[in-house]
Image: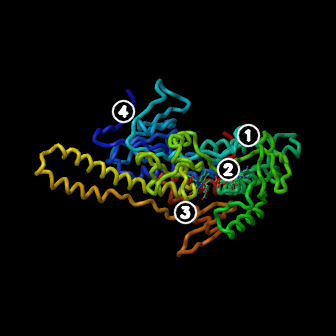
């Protein structure tokens, strides 16, 4: 006997893999009367990723930026089953998903396979390491909640070790050199948050160390933040210069060691730089479960960036019963929360249309056994309605602009504005950034928690205790 699923045999089964931006937005909008809905994710919560760097420096409490998935599902019309497990295999022919409990504690059953009629694949991506030696062993990532918590512990440990009596000045400089790899928005925001912590708290808590702290941001390309306008890139670079964050562009990290990073400089020379902390924010790559699923369609799924979908988010090659959204797909859009959440909301509407169509088709099939004259009229009616439901309106992305926090109470924003672009940076943009995030945080509970954390930090400073 498996888990007790809210099974209604007259409804089709919809399995959603993931509980991130795409999946949660879908769940928010989905009419659960239409399907038997099952959510499978190794995390039983939604993580508000834009505020993750704030957790890494102790501005926000980790719990403030997560929302249990059951908070969303308990308000739905019909019960939704939430299973904390990782999907390990999808069989598109048998139409089944196999998943395993990969958490610390497991019961007698920790692996099972369930059938689906429709599958929404929204498992996101994982951190790209390019198999560069030492990255997994020695660097911190900035993708999951535990990454931010680990970074905070590591960072505080560097500070306390630097404060250890008798530490040589050279070792203090090494321990207090923080290297951020990747000049995309994650690396830039994290560098800004690190600077704020050093500026606002370190000076008072560790006055003797504050002058020895250095932050270096390493980027392989000629500039940071290539997705922002030139004006905002310049603004970020000058803000970082003022904040004494060194930006090394055209510089590639070749290896991460326990106490240093190996850099290939613009002139191709190799330099080994001592440091206490390395944060790896070098972009995304596909998860194994995604690659395995794509390998089942060797002719249709050949894009190495992710799952190829049609204009209705259906996985190409999969007969219309597997949908994919968010960072696990390869589309013309950037892998952002904004895109994933719009795709999730769109898919909720598509699934509603499909449910109506499936219901009418079932009625039509049932009428086939009824005697002719009485049902002819009804059949004609159903066929007419079915024809209307045949065509699904394609997904259309509406870009609301790009926002990034760059530290020193400043943010940058590229906003689509009266058919043009408004590029703004500064303190007003920062206030806009904060209010924008507060209003997009999903629940009132999370908004309250985040706002309270911000006030606490203003009043008392960040908590520098190391858990
Ligand atoms: P995710 O949100 O990553 O969700 C994937 C889900 O799948 C997770 O719940 C995960 O636990 C689950 N999962 C993983 N493996 C499995 C499995 N095997 N089986 C089942 N489930 C699985 N974008 C913006 O637009 N604005 C921002 O300000 C912004 N800031 C960011 C800051 C940081 C630090 C990071 C890392 C990203 C940021 N992004 C931002 C990008 C944004 O977070 C992603 O584009 C977005 O999360 C993609 O949504 P998704 O649903 O595809 O994946
Ligand atoms: P990214 O892919 O945007 O940037 C990673 C950067 O790392 C690249 O510029 C790459 O050149 C560099 N890099 C890779 N390997 C390197 C190496 N060995 N040495 C030096 N540099 C190296 O990754 P991200 O910043 O994590 O962003 C991922 C996605 O999430 C993007 O689509 C981004 O737009 C989105 N995001 C958005 C926001 C925001 O809007 N505020 C914030 C965070 C993330």
Alpha-carbon span between mark 1 and mark 3? 36 Å
As helix, strand or loop, the secondary structure at mark 4 comes to: loop
Where residue 334 appears, as percent x and y from the top left, is: 57, 57
Label 1 to label 4: alpha-carbon separation: 43 Å
Q: Dot 2 corresponds to which residue?
A: 281
What residue is shown with label 4? 4
Sequence order check: which comes first, mark 1 or mark 3?
1
Q: Tell me what residue is drawn at x 44 percent, y 42 percent.
A: 39
Give me the residue at 49% from left, 55% from top: 341
Q: Is mark 2 within 8 Å of ligand 2?
A: yes
In the rendered image, residue 18, in percent from the top left (x then y), is placed at 49, 44
Dot 1 and dot 3 residues touching (CB under 8 Å): no
Answer few, some or many: residues within 10 Å of disc 3's Cα (few below 14, many 20 plus, some between 14 and 19): some
- 231 is higher (above) or lower (below) than 466: below
Are discs 4 and 3 less than 8 Å apart at CB? Answer: no
Q: Nearer the viewer, mark 4 or mark 3?
A: 4
Q: Is residue 261 left or right of residue 153?
A: right
- Give the residue number, with chain letter if any, for mark 1: 138
Query: What SS does tag 3 mark?
Result: helix
Q: CA distance from mark 3 to mark 2?
A: 25 Å
- Label 4 beta carbon less than 8 Å to ligand 1: no
Mark 4 to mark 3: distance in Å? 42 Å
Disc 1 secondary structure class: helix
The earlier-in-sequence mark between 4 and 3 is: 4
Which circle, 3 or 2, is nearer the viewer? 2
Query: Quick one: label 1 or label 4, which is nearer the N terminus?
Result: 4
- Mark with earlier residue (1, 2): 1
On the rendered structure, is 217 left or right of 381? right
Counting residues from the N terminus, which is met first, the one under dot 3 or under dot 2? 2
Labels 4 and 2: the sequence-earlier one? 4
């Amino acid at each position: 006997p498996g888990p007790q699923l809210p099974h209604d045999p007259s409804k089709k089964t919809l399995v959603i893999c993931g509980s991130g931006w795409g999946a949660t937005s879908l769940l928010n909008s989905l009419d659960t009367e239409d399907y038997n809905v099952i959510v499978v994710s190794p995390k039983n919560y939604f993580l508000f990723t834009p505020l993750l760097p704030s957790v890494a420096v102790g501005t926000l409490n980790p719990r403030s930026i997560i929302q249990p998935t059951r908070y969303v599902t308990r308000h739905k019309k019909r019960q939704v089953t939430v299973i904390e497990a990782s999907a390990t295999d999808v069989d598109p022919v048998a139409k089944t998903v196999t998943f395993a409990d990969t958490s610390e504690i497991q019961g007698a059953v920790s692996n099972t396979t369930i059938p689906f009629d429709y599958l929404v694949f929204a498992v996101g991506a994982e951190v790209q390491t390019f198999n560069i030696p030492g990255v997994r062993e020695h660097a911190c990532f900035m993708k999951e909640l535990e990454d931010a918590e680990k970074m905070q512990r590591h960072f505080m440990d560097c500070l306390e070790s630097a404060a250890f009596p008798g530490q040589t000045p050279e070792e203090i400089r090494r321990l207090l050199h923080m290297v951020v790899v990747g000049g995309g928005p994650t690396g830039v925001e994290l560098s800004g948050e690190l600077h704020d912590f050093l500026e606002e708290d370190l000076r008072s808590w560790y006055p003797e160390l504050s002058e020895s702290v250095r932050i270096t941001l390493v980027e392989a390309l000629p500039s940071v933040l290539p997705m922002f306008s030139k004006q905002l890139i310049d603004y970020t670079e000058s803000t970082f210069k003022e904040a004494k964050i060194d930006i090394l562009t055209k510089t590639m990290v070749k290896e991460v060691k326990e106490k240093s990073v190996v850099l290939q400089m613009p002139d191709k020379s190799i330099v080994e730089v001592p440091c206490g902390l390395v944060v790896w924010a070098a972009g995304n790559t596909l998860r194994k479960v995604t690659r395995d699923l794509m390998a089942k369609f060797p002719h249709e799924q050949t894009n190495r960036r992710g799952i190829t979908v049609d204009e209705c988010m259906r996985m190409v090659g999969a007969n219309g019963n597997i949908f994919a959204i968010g960072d696990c797909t390869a589309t013309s859009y950037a892998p952002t929360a904004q895109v994933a959440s719009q795709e999730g909301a769109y898919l909720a509407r598509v699934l509603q249309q499909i449910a109506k169509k499936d219901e009418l088709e079932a009625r039509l099939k049932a009428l086939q056994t009824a005697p002719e004259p009485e049902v002819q009229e009804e059949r004609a009616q159903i066929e007419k309605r079915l024809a209307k439901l045949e065509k699904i309106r394609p997904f259309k992305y509406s870009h609301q602009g790009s926002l990034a926090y760059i530290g020193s109470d400043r943010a940058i924003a590229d906003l689509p504005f009266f058919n043009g672009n408004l590029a703004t940076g500064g303190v007003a943009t920062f206030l806009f950034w904060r209010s924008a995030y507060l209003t997009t945080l999903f629940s009132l509970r999370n908004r309250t928690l985040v706002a309270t954390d911000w006030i606490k930090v203003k009043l008392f400073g960040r908590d520098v205790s190391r858990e």
